[in-house]
């Protein structure tokens, strides 16, 4: 059995046995029907996806009043071609920590559950860190429900550039997400014109662009609409489901 926890370019021998043993322990011989395995099979055929952030009414109203109360984020991740759901992402961060994210976003912890067909499939976690400029940069880890690591996302110190490095569980490069530093949507986000979108290049380890993420701002934070931020993802040459999952994690 092939594991989804190896790089899209290099297969680590034995990974599949580790994953299989843990899933058999959790789900019995029906491990192939477990949410992590089913979702990976689903991702194989997905070429374009959309991430839709759901509006939190309390957050929108308090932001309009000048003192935003950070609520738990929720996202629908759908197949752009079929319109069908892939994952539903639900933030599990406690209330106090969510408020601290506003004043120390690089240091504060957060965790998100990825649900597949209503069942937990993966968990994204960022631990508390004493981050300052280039020191101790934050890392987001991704693992399945049995505790098998898929990979992690590193947020390096790049001065003005917005860059993320997605790596597999053995710290090998999968993809780099590069947003550059000269886009109007980064400095003056608003729901119209060039300020309404930010484009991120998905690059392979050699630096060649193989896909694209576009963040679209459909409405201002103080306007109550169907959703707040949308992310459209073209996976392009990102073929392995583990690499696709890491792109979604970014």
Image (cartoon, grey):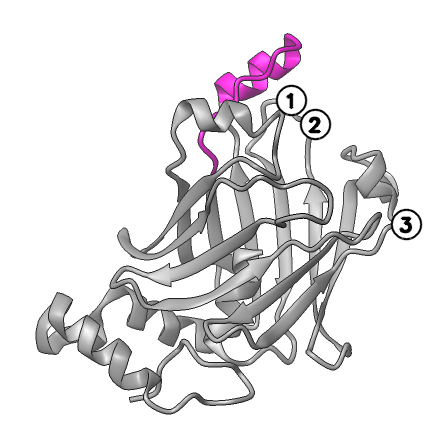
Q: Position of residue 46 (x, y in %)?
A: 50, 72
Residue occupying the point 62% across, 49% down: 136
Instruction: From this view, report whether residue 66 is shown above or below residue 25.
Output: above
Identify residue for label 3. 182
Asked whether the residues under the numbered discs 1 and 2 touch, taking CB atoms below 8 Å apart as contact, a structural biologist would say yes
Report the mark closest to the observer, 3 or 1: 3
Q: Residue 207 location, x and y as percent?
A: 77, 77
Residue 84 seen: no
Specify the farthest residue to the left: 28
Residue visible at 55% across and 33% down in the picture: 226
> Which residue corresponds to mark 2?
220
Q: CA distance from mark 1 to mark 2?
A: 5 Å
How busy is the neighbourhood of tag 1: few (under 14 within 10 Å), some, or many (20 plus)? some
Q: Which dot marks residue 170?
A: none
Residue 145 lies left or right of residue 94; in this view the side is: left
Region in magenta: 57-73
Q: Secondary structure at mark 1?
A: loop
């Amino acid at each position: 059995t092939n594991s989804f926890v190896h790089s899209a370019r290099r297969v680590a021998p034995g990974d599949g046995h580790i994953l299989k043993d843990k899933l058999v322990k959790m789900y019995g011989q029906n491990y192939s029907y477990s949410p992590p395995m089913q979702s990976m099979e689903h991702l194989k055929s997905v070429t374009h996806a959309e991430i839709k952030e759901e509006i939190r009414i309390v957050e929108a109203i308090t932001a309009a009043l000048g003192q935003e109360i950070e609520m738990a984020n929720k996202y629908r991740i759908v197949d752009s071609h079929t319109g069908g759901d892939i994952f539903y992402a639900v933030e599990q961060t406690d209330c106090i920590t969510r408020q601290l994210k506003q004043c120390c976003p690089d240091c504060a912890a957060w965790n998100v559950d990825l649900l597949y067909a209503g069942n937990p499939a993966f968990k994204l976690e960022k631990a508390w860190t004493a981050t300052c400029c280039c020191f101790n940069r934050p890392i987001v880890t991704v693992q399945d429900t049995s505790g098998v690591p898929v990979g992690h996302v590193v947020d390096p110190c790049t001065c003005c550039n917005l860059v993320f490095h997605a790596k597999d569980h053995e710290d090998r490069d999968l993809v780099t997400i590069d947003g550059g530093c000269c886009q109007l949507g980064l400095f003056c986000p608003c729901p119209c014109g060039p300020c309404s979108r930010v484009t991120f290049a998905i690059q392979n380890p050699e630096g060649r662009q193989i896909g694209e993420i576009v963040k679209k701002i459909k409405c201002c934070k103080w306007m109550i609409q169907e959703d707040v931020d949308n992310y459209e993802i073209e996976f392009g040459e990102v073929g392995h489901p583990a690499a696709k999952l890491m792109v979604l994690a970014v």
